Image (tube, grey):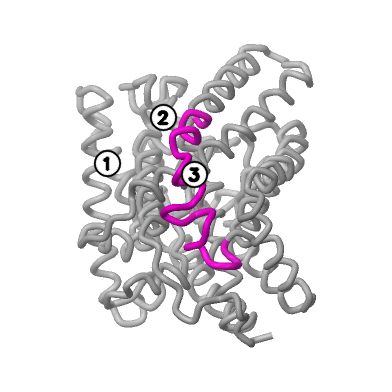
């Protein structure tokens, strides 16, 4: 099982475009968290901290200054970012399994995903939750906050949900790798087929995504989250995320520098068409979603059309992002290197900085776009500096990054992840 397949290069080349895509996506992740208090559909008053259904988990703070454009930008990011995360993470799984074996692979995944999940949820999330409590507390105090926090029927996890879901998917992939020895040949054949017949492969991904998403969306609706302790997940999306993760596994099985996702690959050559399709599909989904939401009790057909439009918008935006980055974002440089190396750490800590800066600006009478800009710049700068410092701490650097330049090997084999909040 540990023998190196003949199709895998001994020293695969780094793909700056994929690293840069991950870096761009983390900026979008920060942006969507920055915009949360400024959506026009939020109520006039913030959500109660101690009363169900605890909607502050999705919208921790509510500002009186709003901007409609933020709603649309957030909707676009939410459509495709998480699917893109799972796709990128899946790209590196099969080569890692083939080189390291399942036992070592899972050990590293627990170290890189499970440990940060536990530490950040236990330590950082209470700190990130405090501004929500302060916005609604009549007589705030540390003792009262601790009492109310511990009385919650769950433990807030915020964006950390992505870590445990990705760890679960990694475990499934490793289990398949061990239990079914012949699956390696099947995955390789599928990878070669995806390169030879990209349109058929795309159609299969869309069909699988629709089969996984539409029934759950009709059953639970497009918005509700489920949570048990610190483990939360949007109820309509787990199957869709699995489809994108394993699509990434198939694509990356023969190396991501190949035809489909390479700098001169099919996606890069057709970036104009991919972008136009993404805009069209996103517009169709916005229209379908708007019509469905305006009806108090939308009929089944309308809700199904809304869910189907979401599937198409997600697919089109995800692959447009890959096409644009492989075509235009292949640069190397100190800023890109630093952002790449600190991306995981930035994700882990940015939630705290974003909410405290938002809270500090609640009483200021300035436009929402000014507030959002200040919060974004402050959050990115503080998170970046904190991540860089943490990477210098012995032991911590091994978990969230490396203490030296990796020239792409860290990105290829450890595939750092940057989750999105619920």
Q: Nearer the viewer, mark 1 or mark 2?
A: 2
Q: Could you tell me which residue is drawn at 73 percent across and 45 percent down?
A: 208
Circle 3 crowding by C-alpha within 10 Å: few under 14, some 14–19, many from 20 = many
Circle 1 crowding by C-alpha within 10 Å: few under 14, some 14–19, many from 20 = many
The answer to if 270 sits in the magenta stretch is yes
Magenta-drawn segment: 252-278
Report helix, strand or loop for mark 3.
helix
Report helix, strand or loop for mark 1.
helix
Q: Which residue is mark 1?
A: 376
Circle 2 crowding by C-alpha within 10 Å: few under 14, some 14–19, many from 20 = some
Q: Could you tell me which residue is drawn at 61 percent across and 70 percent down?
A: 94
First in residue order: circle 1 vs circle 3: 3
Separation of marks 1 and 3 at Cα, in angstroms? 18 Å
In this view, the residue in front, 295 or 249, is 249
| Residue 402, position as x, y percentages in the image | 33, 75
The answer to if 219 sits in the magenta stretch is no
In the image, 299: left or right of 364? Answer: right
User: Where 327 falls versus 48 (above or below)?
Assistant: below
> Marks 3 and 2: in contact by CB < 8 Å?
no
Q: Could you tell me which residue is drawn at 69 percent across and 31 percent down?
A: 221
Q: Quadrant of the N terminus?
A: bottom right
First in residue order: circle 2 vs circle 3: 2
Q: Which residue is mark 3?
A: 81
Mark number displayed over residue 73:
2
């Amino acid at each position: 099982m540990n023998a190196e397949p003949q199709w895998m290069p001994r020293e695969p080349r780094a793909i700056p475009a994929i690293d840069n895509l991950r870096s761009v996506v983390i900026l979008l992740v920060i942006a969507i968290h920055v915009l949360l208090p400024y959506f026009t559909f939020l109520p006039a008053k913030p959500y109660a901290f101690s009363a169900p259904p605890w909607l502050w988990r999705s919208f921790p703070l509510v500002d009186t200054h709003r901007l409609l454009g933020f709603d649309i930008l957030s909707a676009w990011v939410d459509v495709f970012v998480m699917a893109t995360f799972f796709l990128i993470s899946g790209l590196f799984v099969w080569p890692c399994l083939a080189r390291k074996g399942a036992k070592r692979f899972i050990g590293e995944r627990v170290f890189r995903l499970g440990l940060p999940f536990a530490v950040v949820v236990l330590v950082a999330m209470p700190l990130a939750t405090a501004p929500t409590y302060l916005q609604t507390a009549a007589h705030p105090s540390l003792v009262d906050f601790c009492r109310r926090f511990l009385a919650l029927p769950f433990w807030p996890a915020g964006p950390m949900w992505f870590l445990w879901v990705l760890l679960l998917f990694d475990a499934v992939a490793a289990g398949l790798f061990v239990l079914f020895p012949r699956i390696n040949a099947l995955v390789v054949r599928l990878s070669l087929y995806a390169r030879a017949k990209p349109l058929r492969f795309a159609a299969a991904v869309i069909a699988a995504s629709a089969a996984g998403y539409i029934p759950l969306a009709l059953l639970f609706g497009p918005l509700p989250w489920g949570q048990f302790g610190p483990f939360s997940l949007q109820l309509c999306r787990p199957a869709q995320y699995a489809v994108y993760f394993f699509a990434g596994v198939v694509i990356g099985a023969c190396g991501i520098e190949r035809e489909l996702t390479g700098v001169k690959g099919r996606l890069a050559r057709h970036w104009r068409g991919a972008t136009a399709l993404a805009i069209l599909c996103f517009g169709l989904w916005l229209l379908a979603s708007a019509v469905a939401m305006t009806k108090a009790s939308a009929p089944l057909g309308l809700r199904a059309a809304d869910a189907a439009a979401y599937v198409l918008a997600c697919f089109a935006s995800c692959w447009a992002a890959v096409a644009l980055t492989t075509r235009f974002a292949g640069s190397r440089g100190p800023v890109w290197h630093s952002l790449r190396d600190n991306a995981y750490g930035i994700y882990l800590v940015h939630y705290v900085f974003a909410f405290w800066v938002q809270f500090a600006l609640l009483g200021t009478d300035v436009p929402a776009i000014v507030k959002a800009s200040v919060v974004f710049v402050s959050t990115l700068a503080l998170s970046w500096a904190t991540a860089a410092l943490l990477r210098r701490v012995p032991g911590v650097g091994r978990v969230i990054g490396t203490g030296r330049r990796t020239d792409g090997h860290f990105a290829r084999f450890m595939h750092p992840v940057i989750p999105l909040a619920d």
